[in-house]
Amino acid sequence: QVLLVESGGGAVEAGGSLKLSCTGSISLNKCEMGWYRQAPGKEREMVSMFNSDRTTTSADSLKGRVTISQDNAKNTLSLQMNNVETEDTAVYYCSADCRGNPLYREIFWGQGTQVTVSS
């Protein structure tokens, strides 16, 4: 079992910045890490993620506004969000895709952190 705990969510005004963090119970380099979000009435969508070759992929709507980073020494995944928009309001989830790791073989999710952007 892999435990992921997000923090850093809250209320922010449009145009502002926010940094989300996720701390894992294992070394995060054992899995492929990413951030997802789910807005009310919508499906969960990818925000930004690390690929298997350590490159990153971000959603088109967020490119240029988000930066994903990972500190393996601290078992922490971060998401810096700049110039936030009201459409960014959602619950943000940290994800660890451990399907390629023979110890885990599944995807783990954090409990989520709420981000609310006001105009």
Image (spheres, rainbow, N blue to C red):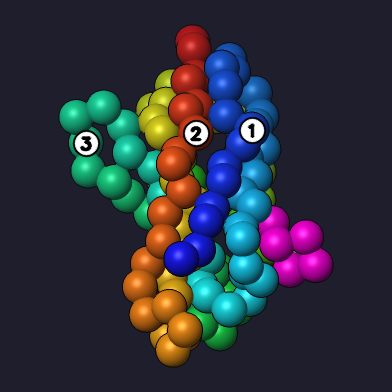
| Image spot of residue 57 (x, y percent) | 49, 65
- Pointer 2 local density, CA inside 10 Å: few below 14, some 14–19, many at least 20: many
Residue 80: quarter of image: top right
Q: Amino acid at mark 1?
A: Gly
| Image spot of residue 105 (x, y percent) | 37, 80
> Any magenta on residue 93?
no
| Image spot of residue 50 (x, y percent) | 54, 69
Per the image, the residue denoted by label 3 is: 42
Give the mark toward the camera: 2 or 3: 2
Q: Earlier in the sequence, mark 1 or mark 2?
A: 1
What is the chief secondary structure element of the magenta stretch?
Answer: loop
Per the image, the residue denoted by label 2 is: 113
The residue most toward the top is 119
| Image spot of residue 64 (x, y percent) | 58, 49
Q: Amino acid at mark 3?
A: Lys
The residue shown at (57%, 22%) is 10
Marks 3 and 1, how far apart in space? Answer: 22 Å
Give the mark toward the camera: 3 or 1: 1
Helix, strand or loop at label 2? It is strand
Q: What is the span of residues highlighted in magenta in the rendered image? A: 72-77
